[in-house]
C-alpha cells in the first residue's frame, strides 16, 4: 500500500470589496476552516493603486486592467494566507469558475458571486503566483 505524499503549501486568498460589502467574510472563511486549512495571515485592508497595479501586473496593457485595479481599490478587502495539503489546487476548486454562471453550486462564486466583475474572491492560481501575492500582501511575514 503506497502512502500519498503530503504537499503542504501556502496560498493567498482575498475577499474582494463586493464580499466585504455584502458581509460574506465569515461564510468564506468558514469554507476554508471546514477544509481543515490553517490560517497563517489575516487582515482587513484598503488596497492602494500601487499595490493593485503590482498585484494585477500580468494583465497590464489588457483592456480590462484598469477595471480590475479600480475595483480592487474601491473598498476594503480581507487578505488571507492559508496553509494546507495541496491547498492551491483545492482552493481553486472551492472558489469556482470566474464567471458565476459557470461556477458550480457549492463553490464560493457559484453560491455568492453576482457577475464576472463582482465575483467575491481572488485566489492564487499557482505556487509562483501564491509566493508573489503573499509577499505583496504580507510583506511583514506570516505566522508559523
Image: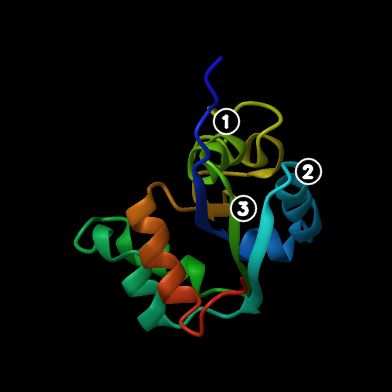
| 2 vs 1, front mark | 2
Q: Residues within 10 Å of mark 2 (few under 14, many from 20)?
A: few
Q: Residue at x 79, y 50 (%)?
A: 30
Depth check: give the residue in front, 65 or 44: 44
Q: Residues within 10 Å of mark 3 (few under 14, many from 20)?
A: many
Depth check: give the residue in front, 75 or 58: 58
115 displayed left or right of 135: right
- Residue pointed to by mark 2: 34
Classify mark 1: helix, strand or loop. Answer: loop
130 displayed left or right of 57: right
Q: Provide residue 65's location: percent of width, then percent of height.
A: 31, 61
Marks 2 and 1 sit apart, C-alpha to C-alpha, by 20 Å
- Considering the image in quadrants, where does the N terminus appear? top right
Marks 3 and 2 sit apart, C-alpha to C-alpha, by 19 Å
Of the two numbered discs 2 and 1 on the same chain, state the one appearing first in sequence.
2
Classify mark 2: helix, strand or loop. Answer: helix
Classify mark 3: helix, strand or loop. Answer: loop
| 3 vs 2, front mark | 2
Q: Residue at x 26, y 56 (%)?
A: 63
Q: Provide residue 45's location: percent of width, then percent of height.
A: 61, 79
Of the two numbered discs 3 and 1 on the same chain, state the one appearing first in sequence.
1
- Residue pointed to by mark 1: 103
- Residue pointed to by mark 3: 120
Q: Is residue 111 visible?
A: yes
- Considering the image in quadrants, where does the C terminus appear? bottom right
Q: Residue at x 55, y 25 (%)?
A: 3
Q: Residue at x 49, y 38 (%)?
A: 89
**Extreme left residue here?**
61
Depth check: give the residue in front, 90 or 86: 86
**Extreme front residue here?**
1
Residue 83, image quadrant: bottom right
Marks 3 and 1 sit apart, C-alpha to C-alpha, by 12 Å
Amino acid at each position: 500500500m503506497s502512502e500519498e505524499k503530503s504537499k503542504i503549501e501556502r496560498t493567498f486568498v482575498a475577499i474582494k470589496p463586493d464580499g466585504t460589502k455584502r458581509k460574506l467574510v465569515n461564510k468564506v472563511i468558514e469554507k476554508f476552516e471546514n477544509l481543515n486549512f490553517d490560517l497563517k495571515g489575516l487582515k482587513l485592508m484598503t488596497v492602494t493603486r500601487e499595490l493593485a497595479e503590482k498585484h494585477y501586473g500580468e494583465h497590464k496593457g489588457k483592456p480590462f486592467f484598469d477595471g480590475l485595479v479600480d475595483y480592487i481599490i474601491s473598498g476594503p478587502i480581507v487578505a488571507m494566507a492559508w496553509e494546507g495539503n495541496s491547498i492551491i489546487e483545492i482552493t481553486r476548486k472551492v472558489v469556482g469558475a470566474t464567471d458565476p454562471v459557470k461556477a458550480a453550486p457549492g463553490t464560493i462564486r457559484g453560491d455568492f458571486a453576482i457577475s464576472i466583475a463582482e465575483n467575491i474572491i481572488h485566489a492564487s492560481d499557482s505556487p509562483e503566483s501564491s509566493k508573489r501575492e503573499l509577499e505583496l500582501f504580507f510583506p511583514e511575514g506570516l505566522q508559523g
